[in-house]
Structure formats: structure tokens, C-alpha cells
Image (tube, rainbow, N blue to C red):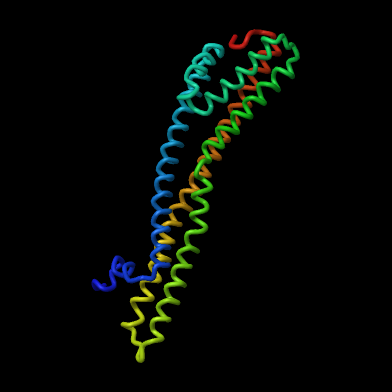
Amino acid sequence: MNHDLSIVQLMLNASWVVQAVVVLLVTVSVISWAAIFRKVFAIQRVRAHNEVFEREFWSGGNLNELYAAAAQSARHGGPMERIFASGMREYQKLRERRITDNSALLDGARRAMRASFQREVDALEVNLSFLGTVGSVAPYVGLFGTVWGIMHAFTGLAALAQVTLASVAPGIAEALVATAIGLFAAIPAVVAYNRFAHDIDRLANTMETFMEEFSNILQRNLGAQSPVGQ
């Protein structure tokens, strides 16, 4: 490809609509890549925090001591730790109110954990809809730029007495660049969206399993009428 047909030169000679479409797609692509990297690190951090807390939880320590530690590091801990802390907090508040109904104690802890679980899942899904939107819309935005560029190219050719391939090629090429950039923005976003959705589903299943297991522990303690953690 000679200098006249380089991508930079094509964009400089393109119509303002095609240039605006390309700038928009490049900007969206940069933002989506930033969101992808943030999400990768966020999921890795959540997974690491959950694994550390699970090891501590199943090590056989006292749950009251574990709750005290979780309450102190709630902001810097993982989702599973915050879910556990919310359940224990509600359980202890109900016990302090002299509620003796085991079902009420267990249901209160479960509702608190469920609310905390939903907040954690919502936090994990931040920017996920943006990636899905980019993956579905970017190709059509690029196609719009291509159609407009081709229309602009043929409009310019109408004034020529003789049309050759050399006169058609630059206009068609600059129009197709918009579609190429649209695909460049969409493909990584779609791949990342599918991967993150899978990872978040697995994390959600792990946290739901933990909530059920912790609820079973509370139920056994209530059935035995012994203090939590014994």
C-alpha cells in the first residue's frame, strides 16, 4: 500500500462523518480495554480474598473471633467475608433482642446474607453491560461509517467524466476502515463479556454455596442450643 492509501492518509481525506465515527470507535475501544483490565484485576482480587477467607472459615476457629476480624477488615476484605459478617451481625442482633424462635434467627441471618450477596454481585457486574453494548453496537456504528463513506465516494465520482479503479479505490478504502475499527472495538468486548459473565457466575455459585453451608452451621448450633462457634 502506497503512502496515498495509508490508513492515516485515508482518514485525513475522509468525510467528517467517517472521521467522527472512527474517533468515536477508537475512544470506545480505549475505554472498553480499560474496563477489561480493571475487571480482570477485580475478579482476580475477589477470587484471592474468597479463597483466603474460606481457608480461615473451615480451619475450625471460633466464629465469633472470625466475625470480629471480618468486621474490622470489611472494607478491605472479600465478598464472601462481607456476606459472612452481615449474616453474623444480624444473627447476633436478633439474639440480643432475646428472640428465641430458631426459625426467626435463621431467616434473619439468611435475609441479611442474601442482601449482601446481591450487593456483591452487582459490584462484580459493574461495566459488564458496557462491554456487552460495545460488542453489539460497535459493528453497526462502523457499518454506518462505511455506508456513509461509500455514498460520499460515489457522489464525488459523479462529477468525473471517466471512472477508473484508481479513482474509486481511495473512497472505498477509507469507508471500509470504519468497519474494520468497529470490529476491532467489538471483538475484544464480546470475548471479555462472555468470559467475565462466566467468571462472575462461578463466583456467585461459590458464594451461594457458602451461604447455605453457613446457614447449616447456624441451624446446627441453634438445634444444639449452644453458643455460636462452639
Q: Position of residue 150 (x, y in %)?
A: 43, 76
Q: Residue furthest bottom?
A: 161
| Residue 35 pos. (x, y %) | 43, 45
- Which residue appears at 63% of the width and 29% of the height? 115
Q: Quadrant of the C terminus?
A: top right
In depth, the one of 157 and 110 nearer the eye is 157
Q: Position of residue 228 (x, y in %)?
A: 62, 11
Count of numbered labels shown in the rendering: 0
Q: Is residue 179 above or below residue 197?
A: below
Q: Which residue is more in the foreground, 39 or 51?
A: 39
Q: Residue at x 52, y 29 (%)?
A: 79
Examine the rendered structure and indicate whether residue 164 appears above or below residue 87.
Answer: below
Report whether 30 appears left or right of 130. left
Q: Can you tell which quarter of the image residue 155 is in?
A: bottom left
Which residue lies at the image location 41% right of the left edge and 86% below the top edge? 158
Q: Name the residue at 39% across, 57% down.
A: 26
Residue 101's image quarter?
top right
Residue 85 location (% of width, % of height):
56, 20
Taking the image as shown, residue 197 lies to the left or right of residue 227, namely left
Residue closest to the eye, 42 or 55: 42
Which quadrant: the N terminus? bottom left
